[in-house]
Amino acid sequence: MISIVLFGKPGAGKGTQAEFLKEKYNLSHISTGDVFRYNIKNETPLGKEAQVYISKGELVPDEITINMLKQEVEKNNDKAGYLFDGFPRTIDQAIALDEYLKSVGLAITATIALEADDEVLVARILERGKTSGRVDDQDENKIRTRYNEYNEKTAPLIDFYTKQNKYYSVDGIGSIEEVTERLSKVIDSL
Ligand code: AMP
């Protein structure tokens, strides 16, 4: 089984690429952002809790997110591996993921980052916000908060996975097909 973490700043194209990669490699795609949004839409207790943070562009606390992630992994075990999209986003989440995967006999195979310039990404998100209906996509201040959260809490993961020799990065600017091709090259080389 392979377990890939798709890594990158908000707007880098993780969700878009995951849609292609999950088909190509028969992976269970687990997007924590999508699971939160599903719960918000259905007004579940988890959704109500998460909404407070998401609507401000802040990260949802680790404990809530980690528990949810474990449940998702347990639900989705009928494929050739996992594609984590938007998780982990903090060192504590990364440690919890390593421990959890180990407990079920698995491990992260690789973390692949989609690289793109901040200003390009902010413009992309604002454009997406016109149709996505996501409140956190429509307000530049909330988008900036998401970038601050990324720089403060998520960027340290680059070092975390580099030390484990599991960090790869690809240029996230280009057509969807070009970027899928770059990601596939990394996955095929694993
Ligand atoms: P995304 O769709 O991945 O951009 O996530 C949207 C929002 O959901 C983020 O801005 C966070 O508020 C929340 N979220 C998603 N994944 C995580 C995570 N791994 N840890 C904490 N919050 C998360």
Image (spheres, rainbow, N blue to C red):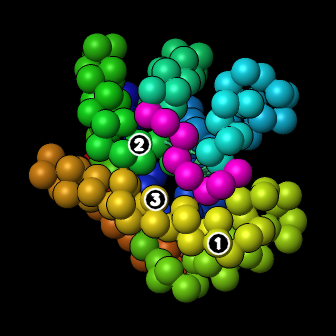
Q: Position of residue 59 (x, y in %)?
A: 52, 47
Q: Which amino acid lies under the numbered mark 3 shown in the image of this protein?
A: Glu
Q: CA distance from mark 2 to mark 1?
A: 23 Å
Q: Specify whether residue 5 is painted magenta.
A: no
Q: Which amino acid lies under the numbered mark 2 shown in the image of this protein?
A: Pro
Disc 3 CB within 8 Å of nearest ligand 1 atom: yes
Q: Nearer the viewer, mark 3 or mark 2?
A: 3
Disc 2 CB within 8 Å of nearest ligand 1 atom: yes
The structure residue drawn at horizontal position 85% and vertical position 71%, both measured from the top left corner, is 130
Residue picked out by circle 1: 141
| Looking at the image, residue 149 lies above or below residue 35 | below
Q: Position of residue 66 (x, y in %)?
A: 45, 27
The structure residue drawn at horizontal position 49% and vertical position 21%, both measured from the top left corner, is 67
Q: Position of residue 150 (x, y in %)?
A: 43, 61
Rendering quarter of residue 100? top left
Residue picked out by circle 2: 88
The structure residue drawn at horizontal position 84% and vertical position 28%, both measured from the top left corner, is 42
Q: Magenta segment, principal secondary structure? A: loop
Q: In the rendered structure, which segment of residues is drawn in magenta?
A: 55-62
Label 3: how many residues lie within 10 Å, few (<14), some (14-19) or many (20+)? some
